[in-house]
Image (cartoon, helix red, strand yellow):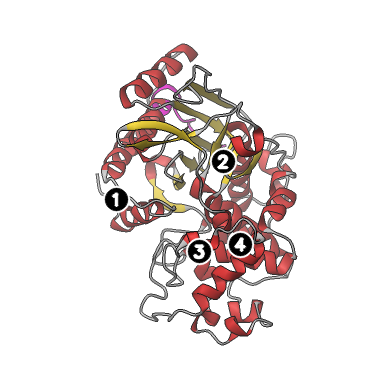
Amino acid sequence: MYQDPAAVRIRSQMMQQIHIGFRWDTRWMRSLVVLVWLWAASSTIGFSQTESEFRNGLETIRKASGLPGLIAGHFSIDGTMELEAVGVRRIDSEDPLKSDDPMHLGSCTKSMTATLLALLVDEGKLRWDETLREIFADDPIVTASEWGNTTVAELIHHTSGAVPNPPWTRFADPEIDVVELRRNLLHWLSKKRRDSKLVGQFEYSNLGYAIAGHVIEKIRGVAWEAEMQKRLFEPLGMKRVGFGAPSKSLSEDVPWGHQNVFGIKRPTEEDNVPALGPAGTVYASMPDWIKYLRFHLQLARRQRTQSSDADTAADPAATIPIPISRESIAYLHTPEAGQTYAGGWTCSERSWAGGKIMTHNGSNTSWYCVVFLAPEQGRGIIAASNYGLAAVQPCDEALQLVLRLHPAPESGK
């Protein structure tokens, strides 16, 4: 099956975030090809399987890969959801992982940050083509910088030319307010030379999204975290959600992330520094994450239909909890010409999905998660583990299992 070189590059760069360096394993794309084929087959082949078969299949995958825990499932725009969890919360305990446990979302946070920006655009407080020089007009370091002409659109599309990561440890002082740390990030970038040859070229950048989050802070006058809570989490009814390592705010009665240290799996509370937040520090229970993902399925449905034609009693898109204009939905879900990355989503067109597919993954090297949305089918699939990058292949296998046991509907209606 044909592999889009741009998609391969984006997948690779998406995973090169984080505070611990690593080399990307190309097995991701090989397993993605299998996943693509299986979803295509699932739309025409029916399977009669039981819940126990789903759970047993996940446990087989988990044991074979040595993961501490694994969660996977599917959901639809109309509210149906099935999740299964296997394994343990910590490798040194027998406390079982639960399907409603919080998991770290890593870079899947980026879509949330882009969504907050869309709300500002709809309110007339921001433009996608607005520059950092315009937004931070009272900051002489920014206005005098070569980076002053950087637009919000370039930040969220990873085309600004910003490096993937700055030296994050320089922006990790817990005694300094997180908003000030992000301003320091902006100043760090502003003092660098900007290579005009890189502008417009895709280069996955956590730094770019951290600065996009600081744009929100500048306009709203509050920390990005507070804005996320007020504008996204509360309206969507997301309750078991927060930032950083879940156990640090929810006690130890939750999963811990894990890393491989000299061949030994160990539980850890390590995470990306808070300043990176808008690029990847959100955790959420899987049902709460699905509330957010279903919201984007609703947005995609709304974009394709006219509200005057919607049957409010039957159309799940008719009661979207956070109003967003069709123009902003299109901006979040549609890459610019020649690109495949939109507002926190990698997008492509595939006949087997009935049209568009939207996907993202995330890891802070201690956790891993991945989501695929098929807007035309009105459904999504997710997988997550409380382990780092070794969970990539097992999570793909878990998604394949979901697709085998739960075929897609015949239409997205």
Q: Residue furthest left?
A: 1
Percent position (x, y) of residue 375?
52, 44
Q: CA distance from mark 4 to mark 2?
A: 20 Å
Report the residue marked by disc 3.
170
Report the residue marked by disc 4.
213
Q: CA distance from mark 1 to mark 4?
A: 27 Å
Q: Tell whether 180 sits left or right of 27.
A: right
1 or 3: tag closer to the N-terminus: 1
259 and 110: which is toward the camera: 259
Q: Nearer the viewer, mark 2 or mark 3?
A: 3
Report the residue marked by disc 2.
245
Q: CA distance from mark 2 to mark 1?
A: 23 Å
| Residue type at the position of mark 2 | Ala
Q: Is residue 236 above or below residue 11?
A: above
Percent position (x, y) of residue 223?
70, 59
| Residue type at the position of mark 3 | Arg
Q: CA distance from mark 2 to mark 3?
A: 20 Å
| Residue type at the position of mark 4 | Gly
Element under disc 1: loop
Element under disc 4: helix
Q: Is residue 79 above or below residue 206?
A: above
Q: Residue at x 48, y 40 (%)?
A: 371
Q: Which of the 4 image quarters holds residue 210?
A: bottom right
2 or 1: tag closer to the N-terminus: 1
Q: CA distance from mark 1 to mark 3?
A: 23 Å
Magenta residues, start to end: 402-413
Element under disc 3: helix
